[in-house]
Image (cartoon, rainbow, N blue to C red):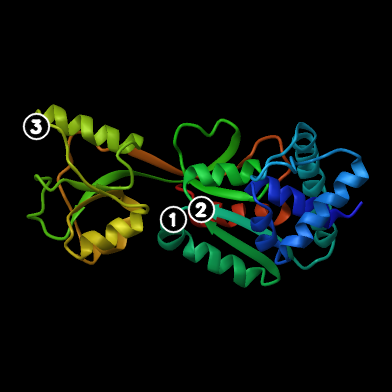
């Protein structure tokens, strides 16, 4: 069996697209199509519906994809184990984390890890908590960093930091007025908390001025005088200390958060991930 064919098929199944699989593997569209045809010939079943215009797996294709994922994961672990037999730390380390955490909190840890283990191929992918968890579930990440959303029961975790969401402005005179507040999403739990507190205090609804995809971008907009932002305090530690931003009075009680390193429960942790977590423990874990 050609394992590369399996990888092309799995990537196409996960992306829902032959073209996307071709992009990921840097091959032509026809190479992926031929790989799927070869697997169908070998297994003597159809893995996708060839009569449909959109990419869709057959029931046999769904089963094949699940088993292929496990097989590819086992092969990856075997390769990592063989590389780990030597004295030199090498091989892959895939880390998924929110962009703001990477920029504000993990930079020193990542830099130190790379200096200590220069032969490790570090892959860093930004993403929300949902993206991080999906990557861990699919075996795309060895370790994830995420703000605890109360739904981390399927993961072992390491507490890295506690804090709270705060209102920030460019000047002390900034306030939650008719213009409202800049948030990532009006439906996130921390924003719902703010909205309820505002309503209790002012007997009116809080205006959402804008929804922005990242806390780092919210910070930059506020620094340019665009309005009041609502972000976790770790995002703006430096700017608050330098006087570039100010923390505004809270509305009700602050919403608390926890930043955690997470990885799947009941699954052996990759050696490179173990070393990374040990470094996180020594540098970031509160004592």
Which residue is at a point 14% across and 27% down the rendered structure image? 200
Q: CA distance from mark 1 to mark 3?
A: 33 Å
Residue 4 appears left or right of 271: right
Residue 256 to residue 282: above or below: above
How many residues crowd mark 2 within 10 Å: few (<14), some (14–19), many (20+)? many
Which residue is at a point 92% across and 46% down the rendered structure image? 42
Tell me if I can see residue 253 in this picture.
no
Q: Nearer the viewer, residue 284 or 208?
A: 208
Say which element carries label 2.
Answer: strand
Q: Nearer the viewer, residue 130 or 37?
A: 37
Which residue is at a point 74% across and 40% down the rendered structure image? 49
The spot of residue 127 in percent (x, y) is: 49, 52
The spot of residue 225 in percent (x, y) is: 16, 62
Residue at image mark 2? 97
Tag 2–tag 3 contact (CB < 8 Å): no
Say which element carries label 3.
Answer: helix
Q: CA distance from mark 2 to mark 1?
A: 7 Å
Residue at image mark 1? 101
Residue 129 appears left or right of 265: left
Residue 112 to residue 229: above or below: below
Mark closer to the observer (1, 3): 3
Which tag, 2 or 3, sits closer to the chain's start? 2
Residue 54 to residue 7: above or below: above
Residue at image mark 3? 202
How many residues crowd mark 3 within 10 Å: few (<14), some (14–19), many (20+)? few
In which quadrant of the rendered view does residue 222 lie?
bottom left
Tag 2–tag 1 contact (CB < 8 Å): yes
The spot of residue 82 in percent (x, y) is: 85, 58
The spot of residue 285 in percent (x, y) is: 49, 49
How many residues crowd mark 1 within 10 Å: few (<14), some (14–19), many (20+)? some
């Amino acid at each position: 069996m050609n394992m590369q064919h399996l990888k092309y098929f799995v990537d196409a199944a996960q992306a829902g697209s032959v073209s996307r699989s071709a992009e990921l593997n840097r091959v032509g569209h026809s190479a992926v199509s031929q790989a799927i045809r070869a697997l169908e010939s070998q297994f003597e079943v159809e893995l996708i519906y060839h009569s449909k215009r959109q990419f869709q797996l057959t029931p046999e294709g769904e089963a094949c994809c699940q088993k292929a994922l496990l097989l590819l994961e086992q092969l990856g672990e075997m390769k990592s184990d063989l590389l780990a037999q030597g004295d030199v730390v090498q091989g892959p380390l895939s880390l998924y984390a929110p962009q703001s955490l990477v920029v504000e909190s993990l930079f020193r840890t990542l830099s130190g890890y790379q200096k200590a283990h220069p032969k490790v191929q570090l892959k860093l992918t930004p993403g929300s908590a949902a993206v991080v968890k999906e990557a861990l579930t699919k075996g795309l990440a060895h370790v994830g960093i995420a703000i605890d959303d109360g739904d981390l029961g399927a993961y072992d975790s390491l507490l890295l930091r506690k804090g709270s969401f705060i209102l920030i402005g460019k000047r002390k005179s900034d306030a939650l007025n008719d213009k409202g507040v800049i948030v990532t999403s009006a439906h996130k739990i921390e924003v719902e908390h703010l909205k309820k507190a505002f309503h209790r205090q002012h007997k009116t609804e809080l205006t959402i001025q804008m929804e922005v995809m990242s806390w780092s971008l919210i910070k930059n907009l506020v620094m340019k005088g665009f309005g009041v932002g609502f972000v976790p305090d770790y995002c703006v530690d430096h700017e608050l200390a330098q006087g570039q931003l100010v923390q505004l009075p809270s509305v009700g009680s602050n919403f608390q958060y926890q930043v955690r390193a997470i990885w799947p429960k009941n699954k052996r942790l990759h050696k490179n991930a173990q070393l990374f977590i040990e470094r996180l423990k020594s540098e970031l874990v509160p004592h």
